[in-house]
């Protein structure tokens, strides 16, 4: 995959900033998985007294292999003891097989420098805390390298932190004349498996009415979504409605999917109102529109 000696000189004694720079250079060689999702660029380098013993990058040996795992595989157990590890991303703590933080602990490394914390909320800070809890010294990359690492992992960070959903039409404050309307929007990153993102109507009393699941564009280059039929009932007077895009918990997602199945068959959404936000309900985007008054019937 690479000629290590072209990237670093195993006989040279490097400074800490130089070792950080080398780890970033390895990260840039990362090979992403072919599953259509953003993945981080990660490089890991193991050194002793400024001399590089081993290095690796994500996906080097096989799709999904982690950089720390690759670098450690190049050393014997005795060689890894007391070393310093430079990894551009916080070592993971949850994984199908042995997590990288646990690998570092098992190999008895002395210090770990981290480029950026994992943006995954299920991992963020856990790797750093676990390493420190067993006496491994944890340091951070210099700020210039941190900025570079975050820049090349921007899409992965967006993916882990949120969808970046926005409502494009109707515009905030629009007057709605007819039912149903089509709601359109954009998003920064494609939803993760398990993301339950649903459109809600919101009454003026902040009661939430489930409407319909969002339809995401299947074209990766066209990051748009739509809800083709949203009903905002007319009354004798103009009435304000909220249009809310929300991510909901798995429990609520199951409930909403069962209603979605009924809606698909009957072409009518029959969700019940929710006077308060349930646990796991996260508003991603919201606008307010006004439904015009019901038109009077013409005289006979």
Image (cartoon, rainbow, N blue to C red):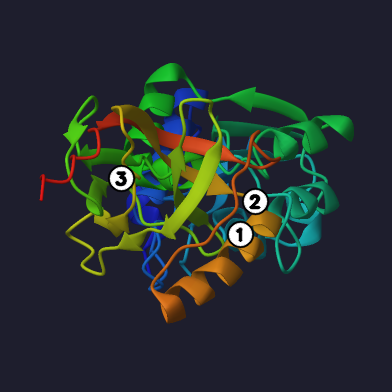
Residue reaching furthest to the front: 300
User: Quick check: marks 1 and 2 in contact, CB under 8 Å?
Assistant: yes
Q: Residue at the location (23% across, 63% down)?
A: 220
Query: Can you identify the residue that label 2 sits on?
Result: 249
Tell me the crowding category of disc 3: few under 14, some 14 to 19, or many 20 or more residues within 10 angstroms, Cα based. Answer: some
Q: Residue at the location (36% across, 49% down)?
A: 7
Q: Using the image as rendered, state which of residue 184 and residue 94 is in the foreground.
A: 184
Please provide percent x and percent y for residue 212: 42, 59
Q: Which element carries disc 1, helix, strand or loop? A: helix
Q: Using the image as rendered, state which of residue 64 and residue 137 is in the foreground.
A: 64
Please provide percent x and percent y for residue 297: 17, 46
Q: Using the image as rendered, state which of residue 272 and residue 48 is in the foreground.
A: 272
- In whole angstroms, how far apart are the C-alphas of marks 2 and 3? 21 Å
Q: Residue at the location (17% across, 58% down)?
A: 222
Please provide percent x and percent y for residue 216: 31, 62
Residue reaching furthest to the top: 143
Q: Could you tell me if residue 61 is visible in this image? A: no
User: Quick check: marks 1 and 3 in contact, CB under 8 Å?
Assistant: no
Q: Give the number of the disc on residue 253.
A: 1
Residue reaching furthest to the right: 134
Q: Is residue 223 above or below residue 149?
A: below
Q: Which element carries disc 3, helix, strand or loop? A: loop
Position of 214 with respect to 274 (left or right) is left
Rendered-image quadrant of the N terminus: bottom left
* Labels 1 and 3: the sequence-earlier one: 3
- In whole angstroms, how far apart are the C-alphas of marks 1 and 2? 6 Å
* Labels 2 and 3: the sequence-earlier one: 3
Q: Is residue 209 above or below residue 95?
A: above
- In whole angstroms, how far apart are the C-alphas of marks 1 and 3? 22 Å
Please provide percent x and percent y for residue 133: 87, 32
Query: Can you identify the residue that label 3 sits on?
Result: 188
Q: Residue at the location (66% across, 42% down)?
A: 280
């Amino acid at each position: 995959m690479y000629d290590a000696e072209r990237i670093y000189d195993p006989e040279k004694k490097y400074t800490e900033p130089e070792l950080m720079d080398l780890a970033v250079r390895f990260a840039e060689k990362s090979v992403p998985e072919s599953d259509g999702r953003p993945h981080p660029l990660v490089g890991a380098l193991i050194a002793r007294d400024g001399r590089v013993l081993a290095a690796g990058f994500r996906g080097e040996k096989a799709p999904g292999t982690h950089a720390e795992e690759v670098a450690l595989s190049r050393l014997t157990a005795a060689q890894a003891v007391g070393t310093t590890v430079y990894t551009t991303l916080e070592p993971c703590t949850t994984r199908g097989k042995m997590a990288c933080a646990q690998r570092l602990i098992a190999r008895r490394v002395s210090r770990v420098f981290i480029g950026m914390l994992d943006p995954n909320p299920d991992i963020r800070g856990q790797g750093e805390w676990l390493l420190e809890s067993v006496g491994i010294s944890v340091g951070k990359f210099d700020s210039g390298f941190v900025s570079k690492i975050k820049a090349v992992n921007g899409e992965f960070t967006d993916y882990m932190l949120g969808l970046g959903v926005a409502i494009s039409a109707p515009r905030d404050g629009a007057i709605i004349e007819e039912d149903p309307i089509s709601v359109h929007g954009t998003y920064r990153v494609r939803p993760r498996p398990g993301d339950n993102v649903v459109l809600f109507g919101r009454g003026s009393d902040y009661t939430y009415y489930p409407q319909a699941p969002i339809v995401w564009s299947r074209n990766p280059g066209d990051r748009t979504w739509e809800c083709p039929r949203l009903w905002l009932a007319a009354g004798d007077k103009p009435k304000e409605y909220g249009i809310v895009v929300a991510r909901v918990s798995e429990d609520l997602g199951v409930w909403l999917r069962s209603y979605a199945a009924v809606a698909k068959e009957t072409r009518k959404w029959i969700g019940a109102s929710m006077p308060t936000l349930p646990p796991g309900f996260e508003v991603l985007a919201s606008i307010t529109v006004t439904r015009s008054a019901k038109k009077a019937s013409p005289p006979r």
